[in-house]
Image (cartoon, helix red, strand yellow):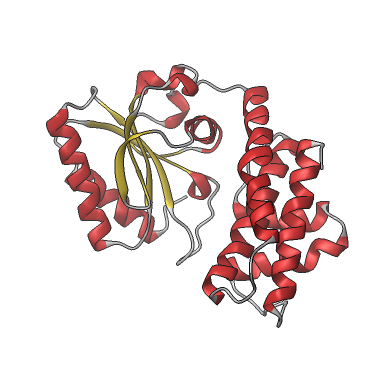
Amino acid sequence: MPLPAPVADVCARFLDLAPEGLITGLYLTGGTGFGEWIDGRSDIDFVATLAHRPNDQEVEQLQALHARLAATSRIDFDGMHILASDLVSDPRDLAPVPVVLHHQFQIGHLDQLVAWHELAWHGVTVSGPDVSTLDVWTDRQVLRNHTVDNLDTYWRDTAERLSGSSPEEPAETLDEACTWCVLGVARLHHLIVTGAMTTKSGAGRWALSHYDGRWHRVIREALRLREGGQAEYDDPASRLRDTAAFTAYVVAAGTDRP
């Protein structure tokens, strides 16, 4: 299927601005790989393959490229620049590479374990050899263990912070907390339960059929904040309590411990 116009535009400009001969392939992961695009909410996750490890000058050129993209587009273009040969190995062994997240460029890592599996299972080819021809390392059990650990560390800490948050915080902050946390933990739990990856919105729809009805209101609200619709709450404090409680509940369910 054709890419959404904003996605196609950013990808075309990236390829046009790239140092000549350096980029051998551009592939999309994340929600775009599942065919999900929500204007104003979605970002673009990518993996770019390179002809060789970039030298210092080429790293500077890549950094300048992403700065130019950021100056002309509000869409986050998040991803990493690797060799195609990197994909055949366990991504946890990957040395630091040029990455960009929320328009910030550095030499480091993103969550390459997730990226490898998204690329192998749901990647979209923009340029270069078709993604189906790439030899990409995957391991379902390693991915599941990684997901459980993510719930047990980052999301457990997040649930604890949420329980102490104030409903007096800015509305935009509270909206983002509801969307990020409710759909974020549901997305991870979906993988643990089903063995399959999904999108944030896909996780929300799955959550409505998987979890008890007491959680449906806050799940619908998270989907509403992402996709539009009528508000489920008129009391920020009540929504914040439900967000915190649901996040803690899914962390406990996904890790088999309170």
* Relative vertical location of residue 251 with respect to residue 245 in this rendering, above or below: above
In the picture as drawn, the residue positioned furthest to the front comes out as 164
In the visual, does 66 lie left or right of 140?
Answer: left
- Residue 126 image offset from top left, x and y in percent: 36, 41
Identify which residue is drawn at 60% across, 63% down.
177
Which one is in front, 56 or 11? 56
Which one is in front, 191 or 16? 191
Identify which residue is drawn at 47% across, 32% down.
112
- Residue 237 image offset from top left, x and y in percent: 71, 75
- Residue 99 image offset from top left, x and y in percent: 34, 38
Identify which residue is drawn at 72% across, 57% down.
205
Quarter holding the C terminus? top right
In the visual, does 233 lie left or right of 153?
Answer: right
Which one is in front, 100 or 243? 243
Residue 201 visible somewhere in the drawing:
no
* Residue 220, picture quadrant: bottom right
* Relative vertical location of residue 123 with respect to residue 64 in this rendering, above or below: above
- Residue 208 image offset from top left, x and y in percent: 78, 58
* Relative vertical location of residue 129 with respect to residue 255 in this rendering, above or below: above
Count of number-bearing discs: 0
* Residue 156, picture quadrant: top right
Residue 96 visible somewhere in the drawing:
yes
Identify which residue is drawn at 77% across, 59% down.
245
